[in-house]
Amino acid sequence: MTRIFKAKKTLKEGDIYKTKIELAEEMILYLLEFDFSIKLVLADSLYGEASSLIKTLTENNLDFIVSIRENHGVWMPSSQTVRANKWCKFKRVFSNGKNEDRYIREIIYGQRKEI
């Protein structure tokens, strides 16, 4: 199964434009129709901030880990908490061989669970 994203300006006559989010939702639902077992969905912030995709994952009881940008808000039940790990330094190596120090941390919204 393949779904190819085409930018609007590259569409040919008869092509139907679909966003990357719509294509991802289609792929997930297609796989579930054929009883494909999806243990975990990982996604970057483009998908992590798409409420329709999060809704699709939740409605289908799929476990997921998504990235969101630092300025993206999250609504949680009042019984849930936010926990942030310490910043960790790592070396980012670029394709030209140069590198630089970067920092990353995990922020957990709600309860962490085994996957």
Image: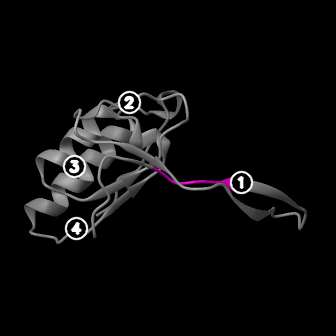
User: Which residue is under mark 2?
Assistant: 13
- Discs 1/2, front: 1
Disc 2/disc 4 C-alpha distance (Å): 35 Å
Q: Is residue 60 above or below residue 51?
A: below
Reading the chain from its start, which is encountered first: label 2 or label 3? 2
- Discs 2/3, front: 3
User: Which residue is under mark 1?
Assistant: 103
Q: Do the residues labelled 1 and 2 touch (CB within 8 Å)?
A: no
Q: Do the residues labelled 1 and 3 touch (CB within 8 Å)?
A: no
Task: Name the residue type under label 4.
Answer: Ile
**Quadrant in the picture for residue 40:** bottom left
User: Over which residues does the magenta segment extend?
Assistant: 103-107
**Image spot of residue 15 (x, y percent):** 34, 35
Q: Are marks 3 and 4 in contact (CB under 8 Å)?
A: no
- Dot 3 crowding, Cα within 10 Å, few <14, some 14–19, many 20+: some
Disc 4/disc 1 C-alpha distance (Å): 31 Å
**Image spot of residue 108 (x, y percent):** 41, 50
Task: Name the residue type under label 1.
Answer: Tyr
Q: Which of 113 and 94 is in front in this view?
A: 113
